Amino acid sequence: MASLNPRLARRRPRSDSGAELIELAIVLPILLIVVAGIVDFGFLFHRFEAVTNAAREGARLAILPDFSDSDVQERVKQYLDSAGLDRAASVVPAPTYSTQTLGSGATVNVVTVHVFYPSNFAYLGPFARLIGGSQRSSIMLKGTSVMRLENAAAGGS
């Protein structure tokens, strides 16, 4: 084995004291975008569940014979209020009543309730615009519920 040059052996390796700071500067924006995405999708999932449950509540009321379409729409908006969503932003069309044929050939009367609600991305939208991403910062959530009418005479008032 060749002996080491004594001049090279005396040299100290350069300091790496700033490497961690540079790595943090590179990784931190990516980490913040990931955290913002997790938070935004958490809020999105909460709103989607509220919209879906509001449609289900409206359908439950719509299958009962003594309630009008406006009662159903008001119940849906009350549910959205209780979930912390803005009732004015929601779109709740009148329930639709129809007949569906089952696989066995039997027909049943059903009611369908739709609820539409715009959901804004609070954190991801601004990040996406910073890096030249999509200008779209909201998505329209749709909740639908279909329930069978127990009483064939009930069919929308």
Image: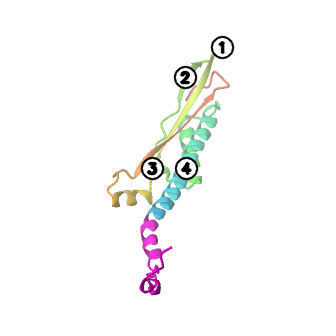
Q: Residue at x 62, y 25 (%)?
A: 154
- Residue type, label 2: Ser
- Using the rendered image of the protein, determine whether residue 156 is visible from the camera's viewpoint: yes
Report the residue marked by disc 1: 104
Does the magenta run of residues contain 80? no
Q: Is residue 106 left or right of residue 16?
A: right
Local secondary structure at mark 3? helix
Within 10 angstroms of label 1, few (less than 14), some, or many (20 or more) residues? few
Marks 3/1: CA distance?
41 Å
Q: Image height check: is 2 above or below 45? A: below
User: Residue lying furthest left in this view?
Assistant: 132
Q: Amino acid at mark 3?
A: Ala
Q: Earlier in the sequence, mark 3 or mark 2?
A: 3
Percent x, y of residue 92: 49, 40
Secondary structure beneath dot 2 equals: strand
| Quadrant (top left, top right, bottom left, bottom right) of the C terminus | top right
| Label 3 – label 2 distance at C-alpha | 27 Å
Residue placed under numbered mark 3 in the picture: 89
**What is the distance, in whole Å, between disc 1 and disc 4 at their CAs?**
36 Å
Choose between 78 and 43: the one closer to the eye: 43
Q: Residues within 10 Å of mark 4 (few under 14, many from 20)?
A: some
Q: Which residue is mark 2?
A: 98
Label 3 with label 4: CB-CB less than 8 Å: no
Mark 4 or mark 2: which is in front?
4
For label 3, the crowd category at 10 Å Cα-Cα, with few meaning under 14, some 14 to 19 and many 20 or more, is few
Q: Residue furthest top?
A: 105
Q: Select label 3 or label 1 by which is in front.
A: 1
Residue 45 is labelled as 4
Q: How is the image coloured?
A: rainbow
